[in-house]
Image (cartoon, helix red, strand yellow):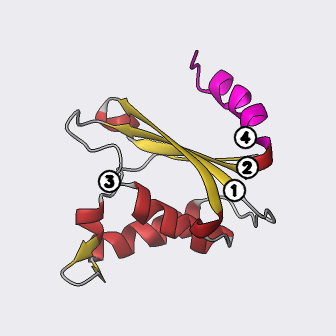
Amino acid sequence: MYKIEKNIKLLSVNEAWQGKRYKTKKYETYEKILRYTLPNNKFNIDSYYIVFFFNFSNKLSDWDNPIKPLQDILQKKYGFNDRDVEIAMVYKNIVEKKDEGFIVYIGDSKNFYRDLKTIKKQQKIK
């Protein structure tokens, strides 16, 4: 299991693309920041699970908006394909503006239920 964490304002799909799926400047900047600052790993797994913890400062933020832009960046960075994700979970948290960001857990789907116990313990979820 790999834990990836970053304090950064989450980018929504609307902020990532303009018109017919052209990347915005905001998305290009976001992608560069993440690709250069996230830890280097390559995952050699056949089928994945992915668990997102999104920390928003705005209560009105949609839980699913940051998934696609972030997942696309993670795919490029870590060399996996989202078609191989078999299990996905998302947790939405409301935090102070200074605490915006995400935590992502990626692992082998065969180990999901075992790893979920560890994830819940680390994130203090009952």
Q: Which residue is mark 1?
A: 48
Q: Which residue is mark 2?
A: 109
Q: Which residue is mark 3?
A: 65
CA–CA distance between discs 4 and 1? 9 Å
Front residue (pair 102, 83): 83
Q: Toward which corner of the image does residue 101 lie, by quadrant?
A: top left
Residue 36 got which mark? none
Residue under the image location 35 percent in, 49 percent down? 64
Dot 4, how many residues are within 10 Å of its Cα: few (below 14), some (14-19), or many (20+)?
many
Confirm or deny contact between disc 2 and disc 4 (CB under 8 A): yes
**What is the span of residues highlighted in magenta in the rendered image?**
111-126
Q: Which residue is mark 4?
A: 112
CA–CA distance between discs 2 and 3? 24 Å
Q: Earlier in the sequence, mark 1 or mark 3?
A: 1
CA–CA distance between discs 2 and 4? 5 Å
Task: Give above or below for 93 relative to 38.
Answer: above
